[in-house]
Structures are given as C-alpha cells and as structure tokens.
Image (cartoon, grey):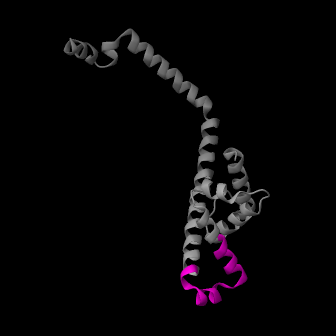
Amino acid sequence: MDLGSFAEEVLDAVAGICGDTVVETHAQAAHVLDALCRRPNTDYRELAAVFGLSHEQLARSREAARMRSEGDEGRRKERDAVWTSLCSSDAVYTWNVLIERINQAAHWREEFRELANTEDGASSEDEGDDVMRALEDAHPAEATGGRAGKVDAAMR
C-alpha cells in the first residue's frame, strides 16, 4: 500500500463527506470508514493497520455501524448484550482513532505546505547561520564568549 496516495485518498474522502479536511463527529468518522471500506480491492487488514487498529476492532466497528443503520441494535442487545457492547465499544474507539489520525494528517499537510511556502524565508536564515559559522571559524574564542580557550586549556 502506497501510504502517500492513501493519505491523499483519505483526505479527499473526508473533504467530500465533511466539507473540510477535519473530522469532528463519530457520525462523520463512521461515514469516512464506510467510504474507505467500499473502495475496490480494499484490504481490511491493511486498512486497520494504517490506522493503528486490529482487524478485529475494525470488523466489530463495522458490525456496530451495520446494526445501528438497520435498527437491529436493540434486538441484538437483548440476545447478546456482551457482543453488542463489545462492538459498540470498538466502534467508539475506532471512530476516535480515525478522528485523531485524519485530523493529524490534515494538520501535518498544512504544516508541510506552510513550510514549503516559506522556503524563501528559510534561505535568508540559512545565510545568517553561514555568517555565524564563518565568525566562529575565524574567532572561536570570541564567538563562544571566550570559553573555547578555557576549555582547551582545561582539557590539556
């Protein structure tokens, strides 16, 4: 799986579903997860691994979403309360992880864009660093506040 293109696909899906690159609610996270799972040739194990989930957590969260969408959660809870509770807990955890990871990716993409856009400003800082290195090379004792000579003398 190419993680760079996958990250772009995820952020595009988020933008299409949420209208922004930020996921704010569990409902939005559930829709994003559903969209990612519907992609052709989706490997659910890889999808779970990319988000830091186990395959079982992903499967149970999808089961919980299916039960909720079909309105079957109440009947299922009566028959098997433990399984339903486990599915619901995994769904909440999965959606929280999705919200966190997707929002981190969106934040990192914005930081990268800002860094790329301020490249011109960074070159002037690099020039300042070059000047400081040249001064230190020419006058090491003065550049370090006279400590270089004292350290050399103490090391002898």
Name the side, left or right, on which 4 lies relative to 128: right
Residue positioned most to the right: 40
Residue 2 percent across, percent down from the top left? 70, 45
By secondary structure, the bulk of the magenta-drawn segment is best described as: helix
Q: In which quarter of the image is residue 35?
A: bottom right
Question: Which residue range is magenta in the image?
Answer: 62-83
Tell me what residue is drawn at x 19 percent, y 15 percent: 154
Residue 14 percent across, percent down from the top left? 70, 59
In terms of depth relative to the viewer, which is nearer, 33 or 27?
Answer: 33
Q: Does the magenta stretch include residue 47?
A: no
Tell me what residue is drawn at x 72 percent, y 60 percent: 36
In terms of depth relative to the viewer, which is nearer, 155 or 123?
Answer: 155
Q: Quadrant of residue 65?
A: bottom right
Residue 98 percent across, percent down from the top left? 60, 61
Tell me what residue is drawn at x 68 percent, y 85 percent: 72
Q: Quadrant of residue 102?
A: bottom right
Residue 56 percent across, percent down from the top left? 60, 66
Identify whether 122 is placed above or below 46.
above
